[in-house]
Amino acid sequence: MVKVHDGKCTIRQPLSSLHKHYQEGDLIIGGIGSHIDVTAQLMEFTELSSYMEYDMPFVVTYHYQHVLAMAFAVKEINENLQILPNVTLGFHVSDNYMDARETYRSTIDLLSTKNRFLPNYKCDFQNNLIAVVGGLEVETSLYIATVLSMYNIPQLAYGSISEKTETVSGRSIYQMAPSEAHQYTGILHLILHFRWTWIGLIIVDDERGERFQQAMLPLFSENGVCSAFIHKIFQVRVIEDFFNEMKKGWKDLEIVMKSKANAVVLFGDTASISYLRMGIRFSEQGYTTATLTGKVYIMTIQMDFASYYYQRDWDKQIFHGIISFTGHTNEPPGFQPFLQSRKPVKTPEDGYIREFWEQAFFCQFSDSLVQKGFKEQCTGEEKLESLPGDAFEMNMTGTSYSIYNAVYAVSYALHVLHSSPCGHRRCMKRRKQEKRRLCQPWQLHRFLKSVSFNNSAGDTISFDANGQVAAGYDIVNWIAFPNESFYKVKIGEFRPEAPTDQRLTINDDAITWNSQFNQTKPCSVCSESCLPGYRKKMIEGEPFCCYNCSLCPEGKISNEKDLGECSTCSEDHYPNVGQNQCIPKDITFLSYAEPLGITLVTVVVGFSFITLLVLGIFVKHCSTPIVKANNRNLTYALLICLLLCFLSALLFIGRPQLVSCLLQQTFFGMVFSVAISCVLAKTVMVVLAFLSVRPGSSLRKWVGKQVGNSIVISCSLFQAILCFVWLATSPPFPDVDMHSETKAVVLECNVGSVTMFYFVLSYMGFLAVISFGVAFLARKLPDSFNEVSD
């Protein structure tokens, strides 16, 4: 209820104002964090029964560093006179209690009268709120943006942002962490890097989990990855349903754990980790036999290993070897000394530190109003560095780094605003004896969009056109030691802005796998890989990642694992026996060194020698009657052509060349046609000679050597014309035969025009038939004849 007295407003202080951390200044940066979990008090079972009788909120001690990151950044800025001279920066951090209603209340509280909850009223002194940093979850950012967008106040979200938040929030929100869409791609790159194709999903059962599922499954399918199972974690908010849902969920998980999928993606929030750990605790107490061991877990940026104080001594080996995506981080100088200097007595304005201290160190301050059941007394001098990693980290986390950069982004935007002539006149003028705003929050938008600076850790911070900081992910490996200590090792990075093949960098040697895998890279596939020589054969009714292996068909090979189809070798290669490799074919041709080549050369030389011998005899005895009677000139021509026919066989031996291919058929066709023409001429002349001696024969005038010469020239000329046309249109050429032999490439001469080849061949056959016919007619002629008389 709001009451007004003498023009001044008063209001009863809400419960949400109990946990705050503030520092006054000329300008205030608001912060809304997630450090107190009121829903965790519903998780009541035997081990907590001694604590639940006390009204004690559960502090997520791991998140307390978020508050300190903002305090450290403000401290550095106020000490640096180069950024905001004559202006002090302050901050007010409120908690949303991980609840939507409290998130709205905390946001409106930042906009209200100083130290009073007055929605849309400005009475007395007001908070000079210039920007708000928050929140950790997507939904929290959305709730905050719903209020701040009405006042056009900049919001710098340090948690992961979804497309839904980007659409609704408009231009008032700036993203200090990468978008969820980049994380989906990063997870896919990581899975493909390890060649995992059979992946399980354990996701929170709400809108966030549904959004994650709808984004990941299409990416999996497009890149050859299958989903083995999808198990949803139902986060109960009503204690009556808690045990029933736990038993139901972990009964389903027993089936999940029997899956062959060794790689499992976890998506949820910090509370989801606690819920899983409670389920594990249940299994240890006999509520279920399910176990989460023997798997490799890939954890998203939304999840972190933050233990409540009552979970601190629970077994952490289940998370040994987890690979987690976290926001990119670096270590600003002086941050760890700043953490070490934090003491409860020195920071009375810190509304978190006392409860953090008690639950982090298992102790209780003597002046605490509520007895919490801790046996030890807090001295306030305990060392933060002595806490385990799941309670508090001394190294700056990715989320804290985003908060640190968000505060600096606001301060640099203010610096540019104050440095501009207009900004200096409007923002630095004050009324006398009246404290007023140094500038309006909406004025910052123009400068935040273009802000770019190098922080003290050496990183360049700037926003793109969509108001998103250019940032990537660190990939860390969780290592749990037997003494329940915990450590994170950075093993790689994912940079969305880099080229596709350079986005993911992983040091495989730095990874510590779950002890179940004996420090060897786990295999997460539905079916064993098909070896080279085999192909995948799909199983009807099963996902495409599940298959059998079958041998490649004859004549085909597969030279890689898990090929869906076998391939045919190129024409100059043939498959080996194992059908996993293509072997180059041997090059073969009729060479002089081969037995067949040697035989042919021997035959050619032999017949050529015989022909030359006969020719020599005819030449030597050229004046004898018998030589003259056989038409000496035609005989010489016949013997020379026969000699050339024998020698032309040498053109068919040896590696085919252009000249040899041109001459093989045409040269043989010409000389053999001349040889047959000579035979035909001699036979015709014999027939004419005997027919002409008959009384009254008119053939006497045709007897003479001119007839023989005419026959030889005319018959040979026609063959010459055919060969000329052949060579002019489509001549023979060197070629290779890839198919006649399986393991060899045959070098040969291609005849070019097949039609012309058969014309030439047919003409030789025609001459041979005519010669045979004439010789057949002359079979009954007398044995003695005088063919030509000189």
Image: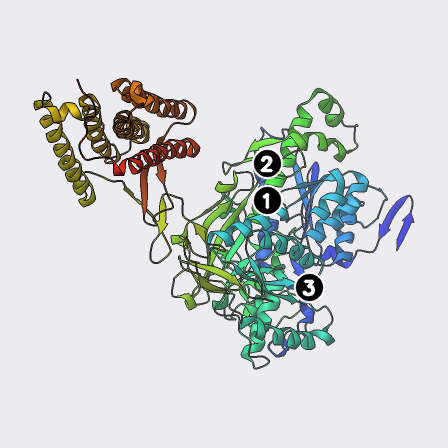
Q: Residues within 10 Å of mark 2 (few under 14, many from 20)?
A: some
- Asked whether 618 or 541 is in front, the reply is 618
Does dot 1 land on a helix, a strand or a loop?
A: helix
Residue 25 horizontal/vertical position (percent): 68, 39
Question: Can you identify the residue that label 1 sits on?
Answer: 402
| Position of residue 677 in the picture relative to residue 606 (left or right) | right
Residue 650 horizontal/vertical position (percent): 22, 33
The tag earlier along the polypeptide, 2 or 1, is 2
| Position of residue 506 in the picture relative to residue 654 (left or right) | right
Q: Residue at image x 49%, y 48%?
A: 336
- Asked whether 322 or 397 is in front, the reply is 322
Does dot 3 land on a helix, a strand or a loop?
A: loop
Q: Residues within 10 Å of mark 1 (few under 14, many from 20)?
A: many
Question: Can you identify the residue that label 3 sits on?
Answer: 205
Q: Which mark is residue 77?
A: 2
Q: What's the amino acid at mark 3?
A: Asp
Q: Quadrant of residue 685?
A: top left
The tag earlier along the polypeptide, 2 or 3, is 2
Q: Residue at image x 54%, y 78%?
A: 284
- Asked whether 71 or 674 is in front, the reply is 674
Examine the rendered structure and indicate whether residue 25 appears above or below residue 393: above
Q: Nearer the viewer, mark 3 or mark 1?
A: 3
Q: What's the amino acid at mark 2?
A: Ile
Quadrant showing the C terminus = top left
Does dot 2 land on a helix, a strand or a loop?
A: helix
Q: Nearer the viewer, mark 2 or mark 1?
A: 1
Q: Residue at image x 23%, y 36%?
A: 653
Q: Nearer the viewer, mark 2 or mark 3?
A: 3
